[in-house]
Image (cartoon, rainbow, N blue to C red):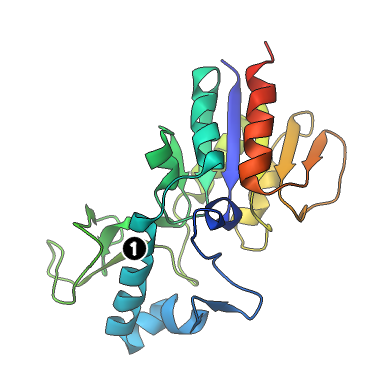
């Protein structure tokens, strides 16, 4: 089976009703990023950060996978598919995708605030202050904040070097180090870019599909499923 690597960003989940990470005004759900998505924010006001991610988790659990998520899951019927996502939601998994690498964590899990390797499922949408890990530290959302290391980035880079088909969906390639992953894809590999605003200039081996994810992804998957 041919190896397909898919890199997805906020654009694919926006159509399920989840706000993109950073709007044009630099805010996320009306909050300054510096107030809710940095280690310093957690030190200053952990209750505010916890509440913010509880609301995000509630939104994720209420959202449903859209046509783009579902189409990518179907691709596994014919290809060896790995999805690398910048998103912290679980919509790929709920759509049926079985091999998903979360670069920035997943909001349906919690983690120890002193050892990020200790993670736990969150029951429901609310993670309360006073809920502790086995080491006795406060549990926080299992997400990578600005200023923190991205532990899965090396694994993701290696996967990109192995791609035989590469698909980029719904990302502006503005957040590093994730944005640099495209540089690991071999130049001879066909690369598909699905986004209303194509983030990179066309070049050899790049197929531009200027559509929103729910239109462009099913279109591409229909094409790939018909290719022997």
* Extreme-top residue of the structure: 228
- Give the x, y percent position of residue 93: 39, 40
* Quadrant showing the N terminus: top right
Q: Nearer the viewer, residue 147 or 110?
A: 110
* Quadrant showing the C terminus: top right
From the viewer's perspective, is 224 left or right of 12?
A: right
- Residue at disc 1, secondary structure: helix
Q: Up-down: is 222 above or below 226?
A: below
Q: Nearer the viewer, residue 71 or 7?
A: 71
Give the image quarter of residue 120.
Answer: bottom left
Q: Nearer the viewer, residue 8 or 124?
A: 124
- Give the x, y percent position of residue 217: 64, 37
Density class for disc 1 (Cα within 10 Å; few <14, some 14-19, many ≥20) is many
Q: Up-down: is 102 above or below 3?
A: below
Q: Residue at x 70, y 44 (%)?
A: 194
For residue 116, say whether it is visible. yes
- Give the x, y percent position of residue 172: 69, 58
Q: Residue at x 50, y 19 (%)?
A: 77
Give the image quarter of residue 37.
Answer: bottom left
For residue 107, say whether it is visible. no
Q: Up-down: is 49 above or below 208?
A: below
Q: Residue at x 42, y 79 (%)?
A: 36
Q: Up-down: is 213 above or below 44?
A: above
Which residue is disc 1 drawn over? 57
From the viewer's perspective, is 191 left or right of 179?
A: right
């Amino acid at each position: 089976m041919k190896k397909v690597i898919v890199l997805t960003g906020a654009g694919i989940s926006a159509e399920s009703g989840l706000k993109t990470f950073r709007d044009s005004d630099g805010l996320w759900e009306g909050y300054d990023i510096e107030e809710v998505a940095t280690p310093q924010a957690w030190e200053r006001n952990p209750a505010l950060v916890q509440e913010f991610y509880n609301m995000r988790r509630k939104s994720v659990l209420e959202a449903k996978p859209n046509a783009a998520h579902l189409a990518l899951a179907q691709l596994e019927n014919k290809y060896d598919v790995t999805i690398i996502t910048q998103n912290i939601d679980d919509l790929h998994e709920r759509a049926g995708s079985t091999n998903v690498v979360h670069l920035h964590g997943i909001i349906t899990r919690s983690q120890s605030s002193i050892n990020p390797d200790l993670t736990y499922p969150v029951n429901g949408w609310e993670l309360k202050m006073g809920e502790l890990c086995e080491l006795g530290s406060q549990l926080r959302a299992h997400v990578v904040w600005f200023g923190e290391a991205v532990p899965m980035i090396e694994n993701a880079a290696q996967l990109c070097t192995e791609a035989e088909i590469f698909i980029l969906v719904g990302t502006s390639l503005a957040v590093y180090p994730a944005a640099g992953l495209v540089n690991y894809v071999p130049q001879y590999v066909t690369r598909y870019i699905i986004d209303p605003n194509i983030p990179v200039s066309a070049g050899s081996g790049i197929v531009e599909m200027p559509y929103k994810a729910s239109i462009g992804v099913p279109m591409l998957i229909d094409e790939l499923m018909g290719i022997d």
